[in-house]
Image (cartoon, rainbow, N blue to C red):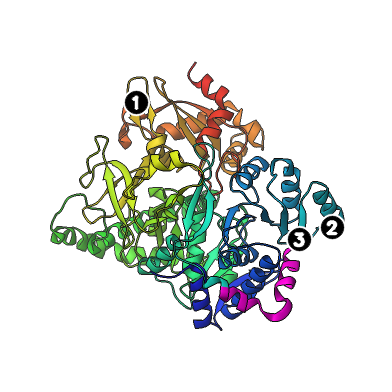
């Protein structure tokens, strides 16, 4: 591990000058390539232009933008100058942006477009340090918008103007090389503010060394190199997507920029034809749910055959993993026993599994393109039933685990030895220990809080010494707040969040995520949040899955085709209560106090940037506050 990200950029652009670094659309047209040589020139022009506009080493620069080529150009240019970027998505609220830009001491901020300029301009009175806004996409930016920003004390520049200033004199590349030569691995690269699932966001300080370590280690688990292509749909300001893009770029692979996650188009999988597709559990869950909705609508023999071959595929995959030693083990036992147990069932299942791939799964795999190697799921736990579905279909999904404070990667299932039910072993050079309530280290299979130590762990929270000390020990151990276990081979399984644990009046401790994951298997449930802290029993807030509920309503003579009307219908509540009870019961291993006694149907969808984080995790504190009245009524 050596050098800064910027120094690595220079090296990879020289080594793979004519290779394709980026694919991006302009004006909704076809994907247009950018070579590594062109990428270097474009980054150099932006960096020189920023320097001409006063950005210098150590400055904090805001970056309010969604996933697109310009985000990466700006990011790499800022880092090349030795400055620090402070990223956030365009769907962030004005309050979030005001807090972050002011707390991070940003004098300059890039904004995606005229709409974001108006948002930032509207809160300028709360941003006394902010002097300049750089608009990355000037489409629709008129003089009136510029004048309005100016009247509020905000100077406006466009990215085009920055690039023109950078290209003046023909010294852009020389300037960038001179600046990046001054860089050191321990230099601060970014301050990423947490999504705020549990309260006010904190600024995580990450260095060049944090990222460089990961881009060196990731290819050991996920083979990336020239010729590979990563499809980018996640919010790039989030550390998960960001490190995926860095890992691809700095290994000589390319990145194709697709639509934001809420608008992702299957067409881009065909058009770009990627080898890897990083995404979040909700996307994989949504793909599975969409397939099942289509099958249920067709009904009859087709639906029956589909379900049969899914069951066959899942059983075949399970036996194959057992034969190959790709199962989570919490006790040591002879491999020969597994081999003997797997050989005969595998022989019997293989012909049927091959038939299923032709008759059922071929259409699904075709939607991923012709070069697809693996999906990568992160930023949340992948439900087991979703994992099993893709495994049955023969589609590799590598689940990883991390958190922003670890920049973010801690572990990932290795491509050549994925162990289902786990998020893989820690990446090379990372230590993980599971700490029980009494402070002792857990044995394999015992649950505790996951602690991590390694070169990717953050410097701390910006301006929050106390909060840093609360999670980061003097000898470098980061308390993740996540609950988990380890296998005898060191793979990690995530079992919940310590902060999400619900304690009932009887003292029973309950992890809500396993319950929520199981209920979300229902085609009629979009989101569920289990509640019941300090109550006698559990309840749940549930957002019905609109399309599935509409289909049910139409088939059963229930009036309404909007969420508000259907959520108020007694028949729909009865339907969903039945779905919950059929899953969360003694038969499925749930104790009596773990069962959901009461539900409330929510009549509007959870929105990203509001009830959901930008990676579609529930912001439990926001939901609890917003629906406090409904929660109270559950326990009356």
Which span is picked out in magenta? Answer: 157-178
Residue beneath the point at 25% across and 38% down = 439
| Chief secondary structure of the magenta portion | helix
Crowding near pointer 1: few (<14 within 10 Å), some, many (20+)? Answer: some
Left or right of 434, for residue 144: right
The mark nearer the N terminus, 2 or 3, is 2
Quarter of the view holding residue 626: top right
Q: Which of 87 and 330 lies nearest the eye of the viewer?
A: 87
Badge 2 is on which residue?
Answer: 142
Above or below — where is 233 with respect to 270? above
Residue 615 visible in the current orientation: yes
Q: Position of residue 235 (x, y in %)?
A: 57, 55
Q: Which numbered mark, 2 or 1, is in the foreground of this view?
A: 2
Disc 2 and disc 1: Cα gap in Å?
60 Å
Badge 1 is on which residue?
Answer: 593
Q: Is residue 247 magenta?
A: no
**Secondary structure category for the residue under label 1:** helix
Q: Position of residue 271 (x, y in %)?
A: 60, 71
Q: Which of 446 and 111 lies nearest the eye of the viewer?
A: 111
Disc 2 and disc 3: Cα gap in Å?
12 Å
């Amino acid at each position: 591990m050596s050098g800064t990200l910027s120094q690595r950029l220079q090296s990879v652009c020289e080594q793979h000058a004519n290779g394709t670094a980026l694919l991006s659309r302009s004006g909704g047209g076809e994907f247009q390539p950018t070579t590594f040589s062109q990428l270097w020139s474009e980054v150099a022009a932006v960096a020189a232009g920023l320097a001409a506009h006063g950005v210098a080493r150590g400055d904090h620069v805001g970056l309010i933008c969604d996933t697109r080529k310009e985000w990466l150009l700006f990011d790499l240019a800022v880092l090349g100058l030795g400055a620090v970027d402070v990223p956030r998505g365009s769907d962030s609220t004005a309050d979030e942006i005001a807090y972050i830009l002011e707390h991070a001491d940003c004098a300059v901020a890039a904004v995606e477009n005229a709409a974001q300029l108006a948002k930032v301009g509207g809160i300028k009175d709360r941003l006394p340090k902010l002097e300049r806004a750089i608009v990355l996409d000037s489409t629709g930016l008129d003089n009136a918008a510029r004048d309005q920003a100016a009247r509020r004390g905000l100077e406006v520049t466009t990215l085009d103007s920055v690039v023109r200033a950078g290209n003046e004199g023909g010294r852009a590349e020389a300037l960038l090389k001179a600046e990046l030569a001054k860089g050191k691995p321990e230099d601060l690269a970014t301050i990423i503010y947490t999504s705020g699932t549990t309260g006010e966001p904190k600024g995580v300080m990450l260095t060049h060394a944090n990222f460089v370590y990961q881009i060196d280690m990731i290819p050991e688990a996920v083979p990336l190199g020239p010729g590979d292509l990563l499809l980018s749909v996640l919010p790039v300001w989030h550390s998960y997507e960001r490190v995926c893009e860095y890992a691809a770029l700095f290994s000589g692979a390319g990145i194709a920029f697709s639509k934001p996650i809420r608008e992702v188009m299957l067409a881009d999988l065909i058009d770009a034809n990627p080898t890897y597709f990083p995404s979040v559990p909700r996307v994989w869950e949504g793909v599975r749910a969409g397939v099942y909705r289509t099958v249920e609508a067709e009904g009859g023999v087709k639906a029956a055959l589909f379900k049969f071959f899914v069951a066959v595929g899942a059983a075949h995959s399970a036996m194959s993993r057992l034969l190959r030693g790709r199962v989570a083990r919490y006790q040591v036992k002879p491999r020969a026993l597994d081999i003997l147990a797997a050989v005969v069932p595998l022989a019997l299942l293989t012909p049927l599994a091959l038939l299923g791939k032709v008759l059922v799964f071929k259409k699904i795999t075709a939607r991923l393109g012709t070069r697809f190697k693996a999906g990568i799921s992160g930023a949340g736990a992948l439900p087991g039933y979703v994992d099993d579905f893709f495994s049955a279909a023969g589609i590799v999904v590598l689940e990883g685990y991390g958190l922003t404070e670890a920049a973010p990667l801690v572990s990932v299932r290795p491509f050549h030895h994925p162990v289902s039910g786990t998020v893989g072993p820690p990446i090379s050079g990372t230590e993980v220990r599971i700490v029980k309530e009494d402070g002792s280290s857990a044995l394999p299979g015992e649950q505790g809080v996951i602690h991590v130590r390694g070169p990717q762990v953050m410097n701390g929270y910006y301006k929050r010494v106390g909060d840093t000390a609360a999670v980061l020990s003097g000898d470098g151990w980061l308390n993740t707040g996540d609950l988990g276990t380890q296998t005898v081979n060191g793979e990690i399984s995530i079992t919940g969040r310590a902060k999400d644990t619900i304690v009932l009046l009887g003292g029973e401790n309950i992890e809500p995520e396993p319950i929520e994951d199981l209920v979300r298997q229902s085609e009629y449930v979009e989101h569920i949040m289990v509640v019941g802290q300090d109550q006698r029993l559990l309840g749940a807030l549930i957002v019905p899955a609109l399309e599935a509920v509409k289909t049910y309503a139409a088939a059963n003579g229930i009036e309404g085709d909007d969420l508000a009307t259907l959520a108020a219908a007694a028949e729909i509540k009865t339907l969903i209560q039945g779905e919950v009870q059929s899953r969360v019961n003694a038969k499925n291993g749930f104790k009596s106090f773990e069962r959901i006694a009461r539900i409330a149907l929510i009549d509007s969808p959870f929105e990203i940037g509001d009830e959901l984080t930008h990676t579609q995790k529930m912001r439990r504190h926001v939901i609890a506050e917003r629906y406090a009245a409904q929660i109270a009524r559950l326990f009356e």
